[in-house]
Amino acid sequence: MTVTKDNSNIDALLDRDGMVSMLSKMIAIKALSPKSGGTGEMERAQFLKSVLEGWGFEVKEYIYTDSDGVKRPNLVVKYGDNDRTLWLVPHMDTVAAGDPGAWKTDPFTATVKEGRIYGRGSMDDGQSLVSALYSLKALKDSGSTPPINFGLAIVADEELGSVYGIEKLVEEKGLFSDSDMFMVPDWSTSDGSKVEVAEKSVLWLKFTFEGKQVHASTPDDGVNALRVAIKFFYKLDSFLHEKYNAIDPIFEPSTSTFEMTKHEKNVDSVNIVPGKEVFYLDSRILPRYDIDQVLMDIKEFSKSPEFIPAKITIDVEEKNAAPQSTPVSAEIVKLLRKTVKEYRGFELEPVGIGGGTCATFFRRKGFPTAVWFTGDDIAHQPNEYASIDNMINDAKVFLGLFRRE
Ligand SMILES: [Zn+2]
């Protein structure tokens, strides 16, 4: 008797055409946060709920009203009769399409080409969502009783901080328990060879520089806020990279990162000296550093006399200290590594990343959580795509997590 897994059986259980069509339908139903100019996830959630109910699953909805008064839905399915549950937690919201001119196809009409499905949210996090849906269906269709319940939590608002998604859901009484296992399929490598177990702290800051707007021909009568801002960031960049320069090889990249990102529109004309500038800084800081100390250093730095006479205000947009890392010896990490080895034939390497998946909220609660799926790093980019083979191969692993020996 051989001990190899019966993959042909699994192949028969997973419906390739069904998965492609499901992801394509989902892409056409926008699920964009009101803060990004959308209407939220309700329409997509109702579609997914009807699909799951059509397959015979009972779906529980957890709906939270956001600050814009929009109802943000989270869907939960639990399948099996055990005391313990292994949760797969994909998210259903997406980011905006971005510059439409940068897309070769319509971001909200799925285009299936050369083994890929193109569209906004196809890979982040649609691919994993569909892998999880179909592995759940396959488990039920196989008629086998799983040794642990299959929990599927499809969450909202992941792209803008999870405030109306997993952050609230983890607080629901009786939903998640200490004895459960958690897996967030929302960070990937092209070959699926890495599992994320640790995160950096996240610090997003907004800098407002206030000077005095004047005609560009008489700059001495005003205070050019842009000049001050440029000087400030040029120096702050070196200061932060030099002071917080530790290297930790488990992380990719191995150092803390401090990146200037968004810049708000200033004046309308070339001949106006801007009196106000607003810039943002995205920092991902190694867990060994105290982020309050980093923030204090930046505030202190901004008081340097060379930046006078502009007034600099610093607002914290997001501040998340890194949660406890998930030990490599955690049961979920061991189970995932074993399953990937059996079904895909390779060893998973544990790594740390810049942070910002639903795993943060589970880890904060003390729940060890593995973050994994297979896909090229094209999240949030134009011409985002999901590979159909990756979607199916990941579904096999997800299903494998629930198979008895
Ligand atoms: Zn994502």
Image (cartoon, rainbow, N blue to C red):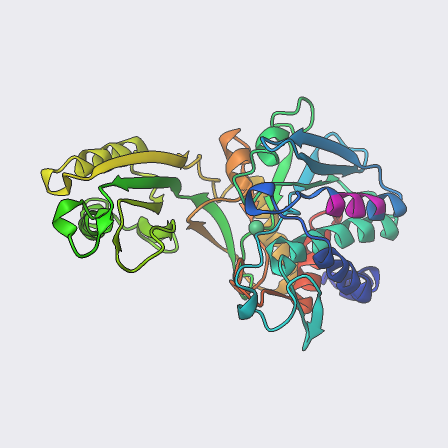
Name the spot of residue 170 as percent of width and height, x first.
61, 29
**Vertical placement of 270 versus 35: above or below?**
below
Q: Residue furthest top?
A: 173
Q: Residue at x 75, y 45 (%)?
A: 43
Q: Is residue 209 toward the left or the right of residue 165 in the image?
A: left
Name the spot of residue 236 as percent of width and height, x first.
21, 47
Q: Is residue 118 toward the left or the right of residue 210 in the image?
A: right
Q: Quadrant of residue 79?
A: top right
Q: Is residue 218 magenta?
A: no
Name the spot of residue 405 as percent of width and height, x first.
74, 49
Name the spot of residue 101 as percent of width and height, x first.
54, 69
Q: Is residue 93 toward the left or the right of residue 267 in the image?
A: right
- Residue 396 shows up from this direction: yes
**Vertical placement of 23 versus 87: above or below?**
below
Q: Residue furthest bottom?
A: 114
Q: Residue at x 55, y 48 (%)?
A: 371
Q: Is residue 220 toward the left or the right of residue 337 in the image?
A: left
Q: Residue at x 68, y 74 (%)?
A: 115
Q: Main secondary structure of the magenta part?
A: helix
Q: Quadrant of the N terminus?
A: bottom right
Q: Quadrant of residue 299?
A: top left
Which region of the structure is painted magenta?
Answer: 43-50
User: Which of the two residues, 86 or 295, is positioned nearer the viewer here?
Assistant: 295
- Residue 400 shows up from this direction: no
User: Which of the two residues, 56 or 261, is positioned nearer the viewer here?
Assistant: 261
